[in-house]
Amino acid sequence: MKQYLSLSEEVLKAKEQGKPVVALESTIISHGMPYPQNVKTAREVEQIIRDHGAVPATIAILDGKIKIGLTDNELEDFGNSTEVAKVSRRDLAYLVATKQKGATTVAATMICAELAGITTFVTGGIGGVHRGAETSMDISADLEELSKTNVAVVCAGAKSILDLGLTMEYLETKGVPVMGYQTDVLPAFYTRTSEFPVNFRADQVEDIAATLKTKWDLNLSGGAVIANPIPSEYAMSEEMITNVIETALQEARDNHISGKEVTPFLLGKVKELTDGKSLDANIALVKHNAKVGAQIAVSFATQG
């Protein structure tokens, strides 16, 4: 296994010194934002993690290796490249074996983080059960990964383009705890609230870290969702975002867009219909998640 992993100098040093490390995905760089905003945001997010006492490890597939932490040049090259495959569990072995460039999704980042001994991962939002999944069977691999991989995922909930009720039901069936950080309800990415309660509310990062340690000490395999609402000054109104999503979904149906093309189409439409405010919201919530994720990782490292 070790021959496939390549740890950056910064991450290697952190591991040797016993410093907490926080994993970051690379899909947000290659597929989530336009260049150069993606690289600028990635660097800022990494710095936030450092500022809060942890070490960032952006994960990507390069040159037949799973890179755990990217150099500044690698980050720039990655963000500026147009030929980057999106990597989930099913794609990981093939892209490493054929030495292609790959951006890790939530599921793939969790796998790679666990291989590198990293237990805290920061992202924007998790995937989930898509609307109409009762006929399409369109369910994100993120949920299955959460059921078996021992990594905590700090996110702003799930995107409201999904069926949040069915997403929560799926996570419950798989035994994945959804902890709300200073919230009683699941945040819905662009909005701070939804109608769905979280399993547990934690107002202190220490309680989250202690829960994670106890979970894994008890050999309760699988991850956990740490739902951290978008900062209120960047949040959008539920009514507005619901209308925007309904419009986008109808357009997707009219254009016969299906499968893996649906999510990028919807996110592009949401950005267009919100005059770009959704991109500002996306950046703000990732930065906020980075701060909370670093604090959790630092607290987890002191659990003993």
Image (spheres, rainbow, N blue to C red):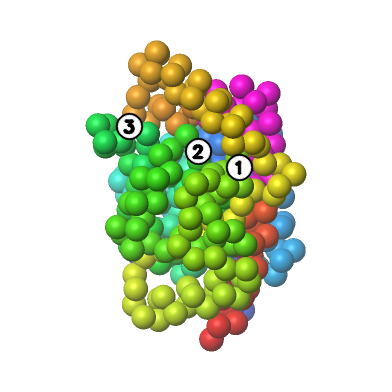
Residue 174 visible here = yes
In the image, 263: left or right of 30?
left
The 10 Å Cα crowd at callout 2, few under 14, some 14 to 19, many 20 or more, is: many
Q: Position of residue 96 (x, y in %)?
A: 37, 48
Q: Earlier in the sequence, mark 2 or mark 1?
A: 2
Q: Where does the image place residue 233, in percent across and percent down from the top left?
A: 75, 44
In which quarter of the view is residue 86 placed? top left
The disc label shown at residue 64, or none: none
Looking at this view, is 132 or 257 the one in front?
132
Residue at position x 45%, y 31% from top? 263
Q: Where does label 3 land, which residue?
A: 132
- What is the CA distance from the residue labelled 3 to the residue labelled 1? 22 Å
Residue type highlighted by circle 1: Thr
Residue furthest bottom in the image: 304
Left of 67 or right of it: where is 281? right
Marks 2 and 1 in Cβ contact (< 8 Å):
yes
SS at badge 2: loop
**Residue 47 at what x, y percent from top left?**
72, 56
Q: Main secondary structure of the magenta part?
A: helix
Q: Identify the residue under disc 2.
A: 160
Residue type for callout 3:
Gly
Label 3 sits on a secondary structure element that is loop
Q: Which residues are magenta?
A: 267-286
Distance CA(mark 2)–CA(mark 1): 8 Å
Kindly tell me whether residue 70 is visible in this rendering: no
Q: Amino acid at mark 2?
A: Ser
